[in-house]
Amino acid sequence: MKHAAIILALATSATLATAPAEAKGCLKGAAVGGVGGHLVGKGHAVAGAAIGCAVGHHRAKVAARKQAAHTQSHRG
């Protein structure tokens, strides 16, 4: 299990290193996911942080789309 966590951490860091520097929602999601994964059990904090980052980024992207749609609909 430790080997899988190391591979997941390396894959996540490689993905984040090549992605643009738009981390909206990722840090907050990673913090929440890391804590949740830590509470689940040994070795799950990294996986929780990676998943939390993805979910947080997705939620921020959806909120940005809603805000853009709201702004577009209220322009005169």
Image (cartoon, helix red, strand yellow):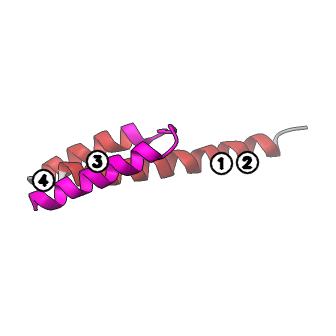
Secondary-structure class at tag 1: helix
Q: Marks 4/2: CA distance?
A: 41 Å
SS of the residue under disc 2: helix
Q: Which residue is mark 3?
A: 49
Q: Nearer the viewer, mark 4 or mark 2?
A: 4
| Nearer to me, 23 or 9 | 9
Labels 3 and 1: the sequence-earlier one = 3
- Name the mark nearer the viewer: 4 or 1: 4
- Mark 1 in CB contact with mark 2 (< 8 angstroms): yes
In the structure shown, which secondary structural element does the residue marked by tag 3 occupy?
A: helix
Magenta span includes 22: yes
* Residue at 36% in and 49% down: 14
Q: Secondary structure at mark 4?
A: loop
Q: What mark, if any, has residue 69 been given in the picture?
A: 2
Q: Which residue is mark 4?
A: 43
In three-dimensional space, the C-alpha distance between marks 1 and 2, rounded to whole angstroms, equals 5 Å
Q: CA distance from mark 2 to mark 3?
A: 30 Å
Residue 43 is situated, as x and y percent measured from the top left of the image, at 12, 53
Q: Can you tell which mark lies on residue 66? A: 1
The residue segment tinted magenta is: 1-27
Task: State whether the magenta stretch is mostly helix, strand or loop.
Answer: helix
Residue located at (91% from left, 37% from top): 76
Looking at the image, tell me whether mark 2 or mark 3 is earlier in sequence order: 3
In this picture, residue 42 sits left or right of residue 65: left
